[in-house]
Amino acid sequence: MGMIELDKVQEGMVLDAPVRDPYGRILLNTGTPLQERHIEMFRRSGITEVEIVGSEKTEVDEASTIDPEVLAKSQQMMEEQFRFTDRLWNVTDEIFRLAVLADARKKMKEY
């Protein structure tokens, strides 16, 4: 079992956990074979990853390759930038995460 980024999900894969929208409503239940229309619905709902039967996330967590001090500074700066946003939405939270990583990578290059 593993979380798979939505861009890597393919038709026919089977959900290993229910997919919920930002309000906690179930969009699709465990055991559902995915169709292209489901994947599009997830995109429209701001879902960025789903749990798929038989998969394991093997990607290296990019944040683990960045100096924790630099990452903390970037996160603090981005929290100020995102202070008026609702990060309960998956899309907004994903944009926040990517902004933190981009800023941290930029700072690492400056060192």
Image (cartoon, rainbow, N blue to C red):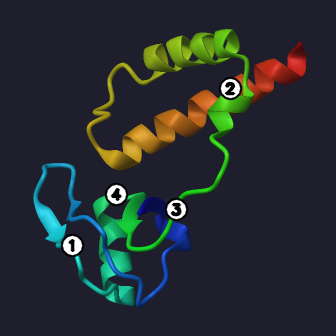
Q: Nearer the viewer, mark 4 or mark 1?
A: 1
Residue 99 rendering spot, x and y as whole percentages: 58, 33
- Would you place residue 22 above or below residue 93 in this image? below
| Residue type (three-letter) at the residue carrying disc 4 | Gly
- Would you place residue 105 above or below residue 53 in this image? above
Q: How many marks?
A: 4
Distance of mark 4 from mark 1, alpha carbons? 19 Å
| Residue type (three-letter) at the residue carrying disc 3 | Glu
The disc, 3 or 1, on the residue closer to the chain's N-terminal end is: 1
Residue 75 rendering spot, x and y as whole percentages: 54, 18
Distance of mark 3 from mark 1, alpha carbons? 17 Å
- Secondary structure state at the residue bearing disc 1: loop
**Residue denoted by label 3:** 56
Residue visible at 33% across and 30% down in the picture:
85
Residue visible at 62% across and 56% down in the picture:
58
The disc, 4 or 2, on the residue closer to the chain's N-terminal end is: 4
- Secondary structure state at the residue bearing disc 3: loop
The disc at residue 103 is 2
Q: CB atoms at circles 3 and 2 under 8 Å apart?
A: no
The disc at residue 46 is 4
Distance of mark 4 from mark 2, alpha carbons? 23 Å
The disc at residue 30 is 1
Residue 109 rendering spot, x and y as whole percentages: 87, 23
Q: Nearer the viewer, mark 1 or mark 2?
A: 1
- Would you place residue 58 above or below residue 83 in this image? below
- Secondary structure state at the residue bearing disc 2: helix
Residue visible at 54% across and 69% down in the picture:
7
Mark 2 is surrounded, within 10 Å at the Cα level, by few (under 14), some (14 to 19) or many (20 or more) other residues, namely some
The disc, 3 or 4, on the residue closer to the chain's N-terminal end is: 4
